[in-house]
Image: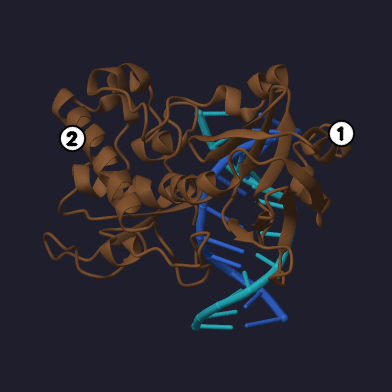
Chain colours: A brown, B cyan, C blue
Amino acid sequence: MPELPEVEATRRAIAGELTGNRVSLVEVGRDRMLRRQERPGDFAERLSGRRIERWRRHGKFLIADLEGDVAWVTHLGMSGRVQLAGPAEARVAHTNVVVATEGGTEFRLVDPRTFGFVAAYLPDELAASPVGRLGPDALDALPSARQLGVLLRGRSVPIKPALLDQRIVSGIGNIYADEALSRAAISPHRPAGSLETAELSRLRRSIADTLQMGLRWGGTSLDDLAYLLPDGATGDYTRRLRAYGREGKPCRRCGLPIRRDVLRQRSTFWCEGCQR
DNA sequence: ACCTCCCTGGCC
DNA sequence: GGCCAGGGAGGT
């Protein structure tokens, strides 16, 4: 599942090849991918002929800044991945968006479940879009423990869904939230506002460590839907997961079986023995 | 602040 | 054949 480490790995993999190039052709095979674009025709029109100046990322949103103040935003949803390919290479199934560049390399968004999207925003539209409402990036601008305390103060929502709230801190998804709480030895059910100073410090460090480890090991690829890097490699972090997807298996620290609860309609894996 | 829905492939 | 996975939007 593309969460922050997977999106960051994607950004790094494509930035070298696509930065500085001009967009030559845009194809959208599934209109649904443009559902965030107020007028779908704007997407191809706004990209065409413009040079890609840089690739950045905010949370799970991948952003290409184009000349003329156009922001090309890509979200991978839960099943999206970016493929770089030459025009002659066969397209794999579910290649829903293709952006060709004058350099010859095509950006291909492959997304079976179509929860991802692309859009081209002008500056005021970007600010009004979900990108404009994101909290600080969990990798590049992770708040200090003290700041986290301020962000979570007074909130009765359990800490797990609070970590998934992209307006508080952006980039943490369901897998890395469970992993961070496991590392921090904090129960996912704890009211977000109840964390004490030492716990906030552990949580902050755990979020940073978890995301760094995900990035280092090439992300998380699950069985049912292999997340793939743009070069087709599978993420190797999966084998290192401590909690996520390990229901009934022994906790790597205390040996008690990992349990699965559903919080806010989301699977949550945790250890009752270790996490308080 | 909460729940439902979107979508498809893979698995039981 | 039916269920499940899940990020984010929209509705109540």
User: What whole-number distance in Å separates the C-alpha atoms at marks 2 and 1?
Assistant: 45 Å
Nearer-the-camera pick, A75 or C9: A75
Residue at x 53%, y 67% (from the top left corner): A225
Whether residue A66 is visible here, answered yes or no, is yes
- The x and y percentages for residue A203 are 24, 35
Q: Chain of mark 2?
A: A
Report the side of A217 relative to A133 (left or right). left
Identify the mark nearer the N-term, 2 or 1: 1
Residue A247, by quadrant, is bottom left
Residue A126: image tag: none
Q: Is residue A34 above or below residue A169?
A: below
Dot 1, crowdedness within 10 Å: few (<14), some or many (≥20)?
few
Judged from the image, the secondary structure of the residue bearing numbered disc 1 is: loop
Q: Nearer the viewer, residue A104 or A149?
A: A104
Q: Position of residue A101 (x, y in %)?
A: 71, 48
Which residue carries the number 1 mark? Answer: A39
- Give the amino acid type for the residue marked by disc 2 in the picture: Arg
Q: Is residue A250 left or right of residue A259?
A: left
- For numbered disc 2, what is the local secondary structure? helix
Task: Answer with the quarter of the image where residue A75 lies.
Answer: top right
Residue found at the far front of this picture: A103
A211 with respect to A8 (left or right):
left
Observer-nearest residue: A83 or A137? A83
The structure residue drawn at horizontal position 67% and vertical position 50%, both measured from the top left corner, is A103
* Amino acid identity at mark 1: Arg
> Which residue is labeled 2 in the image?
A202
The location of residue A94, given as percent across then percent down, is: 71, 65
Q: Chain of mark 1?
A: A
Q: In the shown orientation, is residue A253 left or right of residue A182?
A: left
